[in-house]
Image: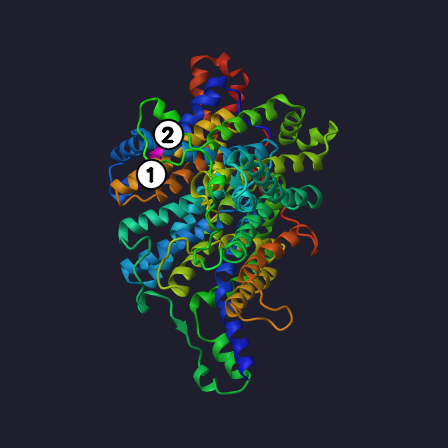
Amino acid sequence: MSTPYAKLPAWADYGLIPLINLSVAFIVAGFVVMLVGENPFRAAVILVEGAFGKGTGIAFTLFYATTFIFTGLSVAVAAHCSLFNIGTEGQAYIGGLGIALVCLSFDSVLPWWVIFPIAIVAAAVFGALWGFIPAYLQAKRGSHIVITTIMFNFIAASVMVYLLVGPLKPAGSQAPQTRNFLAGAELPKLNWIIELFGAKIRSAPLNICFLLALVMAFLVWLLIWRTKLGYEMRTYGHSPKAARYAGISETRIILTAMMISGALAGMMALNPVMGDQHNVAIDFVSGAGYVGIAVALMGRLHPVGIVLAAILFGMLYQGGAELAFEMPAISRDMIVIIQGLVILFAGALEHMFRPYIQAVFASFSPKAVGIEAVKGKGA
Amino acid sequence: MDSFNAIVQVLDSTIRLSVPLLLACLAGLYSERAGIFDIGLEGKMLVGAFAGAAAASVFHSGFIGLGMAILISVAFAMVHGFASITHRGNQIVSGVAINFVAAGSTIILGQAWFQQGGRTPALQPDERFEAIVWPGADVLRGVPILGPIYSELISGHSILVYFAFAMVPFTWWVLFRTRFGLRMRAVGENPAAVDTAGISVAWLRYRALICTGVLTGVAGAYLSMVQNGGFVKDMTAGKGYIALAALIFAKWKPVNAMFACLLFGFLDALSIRLQGTPLPVIGKVPVQFMQALPYVLTVILLAGFIGKAIPPRAGGVPYVKER
């Protein structure tokens, strides 16, 4: 995509503009809080205290962040290839199916450190397969990936509901979920790390998946910026024509990118399923796939940014729960609004403030923005 | 006779269930024909449904409710336009954002204003759009075959149902017989040509989005004020996406859109009717299969196995005037 905008210094591009966009999103969210009749500043204080005030809060924040790192990376990998994967939600859901099959088969015979790697592979494979079909259809039959992945989210939901009220439900149970896993499929908690710093923790679900998520963030960075495949993906993302001219196979690159994206989405399911719930229930993903879109956009598709954005959203989730407790008028759905506003201002309206910032920069030092800035100002 | 009555009943609920799809589908048709992808149909319907039910119960008038639904829905469409036309943002990202803002704000505001767990108060009969009984419907009910068809299928719907079906020929007329329609189609295929002719691409696209907003507003009002006597959270439940699927299925043509929506509505009606009853040849079909069928059909169509769906050429691409 060609940007009709002149260049800015890197720190403004990657620091200032996202920060401004984010602030605007939160200011608008503040207005919604006012509309509800509460004080937005008090709400913000409660939110931050709830997320970081106590050890338990921090652990919960990081637990949610783990989930969002996976989904954010998933969206970002596809986005580098200019594929908009809205199907993260469905891929994670189906990834949960893979985990369920592994855990239900082996949890009575194997210890967690054997089951965990098998479950990682199963989750990744199931997620990747669910990403493969839309990718194949896009590459070979030209159907739009956004529409197909949305359709696949609904199909995934139907498949999982069918399985969870039917074949996977233990006999005699009413709840639409699998039986609880045995100790073999429970992942060790990481709460001791926070306790090292002297904070006390009452049962929080932070588990080893957090480390896995960080490893994956590093691997994604390696993939995108340090491998041939990543280079090809970015090339295709910038200009499919140039990629074709350079001899990069369109089919191969779309399929690989979407399968990696699907695999990362599938691995997200490890965190809630094996780390917290110890079963697979209906709608256990509960929108985390969509949060991934916000996280990826806010993190500007870079793993470091994604980890930070994921922690921010983890904070919103955990702090939001506390907020709902303190201010009954503001339920957890406030986060959905904030999420939407972040996607709007950091995603769709990404360039809204750019011309103004450019003008400010140009007035200080015309050199910093280059001569093009004068032309680009009207943009 | 029993099976005939059953068929009439299924067809009757087919009409009721396809109306919101049809309105949303035609809404999408306006914006996509003008070259603006709109994933945000779902969200606009949702805010329309909420605004309609909320205003109707506060002002005790169905028409004020409908007006409010349209107003708020158009406002959201304008946000989409501001992001994707004026600021040339990614149209899909903007649509996704609108869906989230709609999903969250309807619940939060609903809870804050009415304290009923995100619902609006149940609407009284005079705050809703009641069924219109056509002349002679009661007299003719006894007549075999034609009687039930006239009195059940044709008569006895709310005004919004007739509006939705009237919008089909109207949209066709606008699209293919008016200057605005011609320009709108042109701007979706080749905006540069429209620009060369001295017509504002942005203003045309904004007008198309206003049409979208009006129709999604009516669709939302239908959901909360006709089908259901009040707003319930997340009541659109993916209908915006099915409408989008129907639009592709219809290859962006109004009359096809009606048939696609009737087909999807029929599948929905059938799955409700068949819940738990086994079919003669296939045996018991899981409800989930019927629910997934519209999505599966769309995927198959998109893959080019049932004819090829070719979207407007400039769809999804922000227009940059050459300098």
Q: Looking at the picture, how far across and down is residue A373, in whole percent?
A: 51, 20
Q: Mark 2 lies on which chain?
A: A
Mark 1 burial class by Cα count in 10 Å: few <14, some 14-19, many 20+? many
**Residue at (38% x, 46% y) in the render:** B104
Can I make out residue A153 in this image? yes
In the picture, which quadrant includes the N terminus of chain A?
top right
Q: Looking at the picture, how far across and down is residue B176, in whole percent?
A: 61, 57
Q: Of residues B209 and A181, which is closer to you in this image?
A: A181
Query: Is the same chain shared between marks 2 and 1?
Result: yes
Q: Of residues B123 and B253, which is closer to you in this image?
A: B123
Q: Of residues A53 and B209, which is closer to you in this image?
A: A53
Mark 2: amino acid: Ser
Q: Looking at the picture, how far across and down is residue B53, in whole percent?
A: 34, 58
Mark 1: amino acid: Gly
| Residue under pointer 1 | A320
Q: Mark 1 lies on which chain?
A: A
Kind of element beneath mark 1: helix
Asked if marks 2 and 1 touch (Cβ < 8 Å), the reply is no
In the displayed structure, A247 sits above or below B227; it is above
Q: Give the range drawn in magenta.
A: A25-32
Q: Does residue A67 appear left or right of residue A244 in this picture?
A: left
**Residue at (50% x, 43% y) in the render:** B203
Q: Closer to the camera: disc 2 or disc 1?
A: 1
Q: Does the magenta stretch include residue A332?
A: no
Q: Is residue A31 magenta?
A: yes
Kind of element beneath mark 2: helix
**Residue at (61% x, 33% y) in the render:** A81
Q: Of residues B6 and B180, which is closer to you in this image?
A: B6
Q: Does residue A197 appear left or right of residue B262 in this picture?
A: left
| Residue under pointer 2 | A23
